[in-house]
Image (cartoon, rainbow, N blue to C red):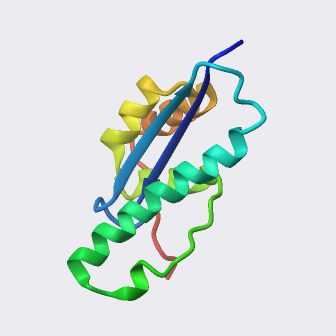
């Protein structure tokens, strides 16, 4: 019997406007249901975000979406570092996450003094 932990995060890739996370802990062997559980929790977070945005913008297309759940690519986190997005949240995750590979990667990219991305002219 072990503890199973799911950590899900949803955040804007373009600005600081969206960042939500949820940590779910199972005190039983959840290995058979873990993939379905991840999808449920990610979709719930995204639906909350879309509903919140719908309440502000009154755009019905916001709540008529079917979110796709997928693991974020490491290159996206690196790109977000270059734009200085969510760095405080990523620092917090790097200290408190239960996922050692995520913690290690975030510590490494947060340690870069700066990253500059610009268009070649």
Towards the viewer: 20 or 60? 60
Q: Residue at x 24, y 82 (%)?
A: 57
| Residue at horizontal 43 percent and vertical 50 percent from the top | 81
Q: Is residue 27 left or right of residue 32?
A: left
Residue placed most toward the observer, 16 or 29: 29
Q: Residue furthest toward the top?
A: 1
* Quarter of the image where the N terminus is located: top right
Q: At 72% from the left edge and 39% from the top edge, which residue is drawn?
A: 33
The image shows a total of numbered marks equal to 0
Residue 51 in sight here: yes
Name the spot of residue 16 as percent of width and height, x first.
29, 59
Residue at the far left in the pictured view: 56
Where residue 80 appears, as percent x and y from the top left, is 44, 55
The image shows residue 77, relative to residue 2, as above or below, that is: below
Residue 4 figure quarter: top right
Residue 85 visible in rendering: no
- 118 horizontally vs 19: left or right: right
**Residue 73 rendering spot, x and y as whole percentages:** 63, 54
Is 92 in front, or is 110?
Answer: 92
Q: Residue at x 63, y 30 (%)?
A: 101
Question: Which quadrant of the view contains residue 113?
Answer: top left
| Location of residue 99 with respect to 81 vertically, above or below | above
- Reply above or below: 48 against 5: below
Closer to the camera, 70 or 104? Answer: 70
Rendered view: 101 above or below 36: above
């Amino acid at each position: 019997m072990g503890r199973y932990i799911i950590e899900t995060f949803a955040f804007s890739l373009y600005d600081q406007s969206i960042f939500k996370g949820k940590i779910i802990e199972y005190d039983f062997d959840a290995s058979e249901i873990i993939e379905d559980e991840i999808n449920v929790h990610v979709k719930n977070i995204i639906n909350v975000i879309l509903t919140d945005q719908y309440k502000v913008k009154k755009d019905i297309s916001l709540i008529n979406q079917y979110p796709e759940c997928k693991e974020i690519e490491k290159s996206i986190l690196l790109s977000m570092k270059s734009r200085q997005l969510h760095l405080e949240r990523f620092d917090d995750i790097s200290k408190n996450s239960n996922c050692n590979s995520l913690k290690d990667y975030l510590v490494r990219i947060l340690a870069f003094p700066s990253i500059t991305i610009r268009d070649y002219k």
